[in-house]
């Protein structure tokens, strides 16, 4: 199960299609071929996503599995 506290690198390893999904949401997790380190929550907070928006992204990611 994916949670907001998953490390971005673990998320990408577990669910490669998450890269495109997150990019479509405005959360770029791969820059110049290098992964962005930290958690999904930290990445989303850095882009000013609300807790409700983050929860919705987590729900959608789990549905992609």
Image: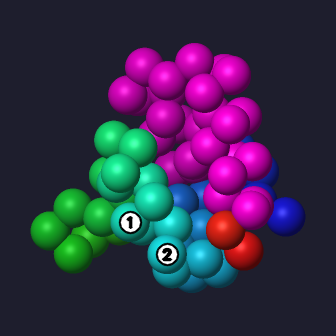
Range of residues picked out in magenta: 37-63
Question: Which of 10/65 is in front?
Answer: 65
Is 33 left, or right, of 12 in this rendering?
Answer: left
Q: Which quadrant of the rendered structure holds the C terminus?
A: bottom right
Q: CA distance from mark 2 to mark 1?
A: 6 Å
Residue shown at 14% from the left, 68% from the top: 32
Residue beneath the point at 74% across and 62% down: 63
**Which residue corresponds to the image point at 57% horizontal and 18% vertical from the top-left?**
50
Q: Position of residue 8 (x, y in %)?
A: 53, 60
Is 1 drawn above or below residue 65 in the view shown?
Answer: above
Disc 2: which residue: 17
Assess whether residue 54 is covered by the magenta stretch: yes
**Residue 5 in sight from this viewpoint:** no
Question: Looking at the rendering, which quadrant does residue 11 occupy?
Answer: bottom right
Task: Tell me the residue that label 1 is attached to.
Answer: 20
Q: Is residue 58 above or below residue 1?
A: above
Residue 42 position, x and y percent, is: 53, 36
Q: Quadrant of residue 64?
A: bottom right
Q: Secondary structure at mark 1?
A: helix
Most common secondary structure along the magenta stretch: helix
Instruction: Check if mark 2's residue and mark 1's residue have beta carbons within 8 Å.
Output: yes
């Amino acid at each position: 199960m994916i949670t907001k506290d998953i490390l971005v690198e673990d998320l990408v390893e577990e669910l490669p299609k998450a890269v495109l999904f997150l990019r479509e949401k405005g959360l770029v997790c791969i820059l110049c071929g290098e992964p962005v380190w930290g958690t999904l929550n930290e990445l989303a907070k850095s882009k000013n996503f609300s807790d409700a928006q983050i929860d919705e992204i987590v729900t959608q990611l789990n549905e992609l599995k």
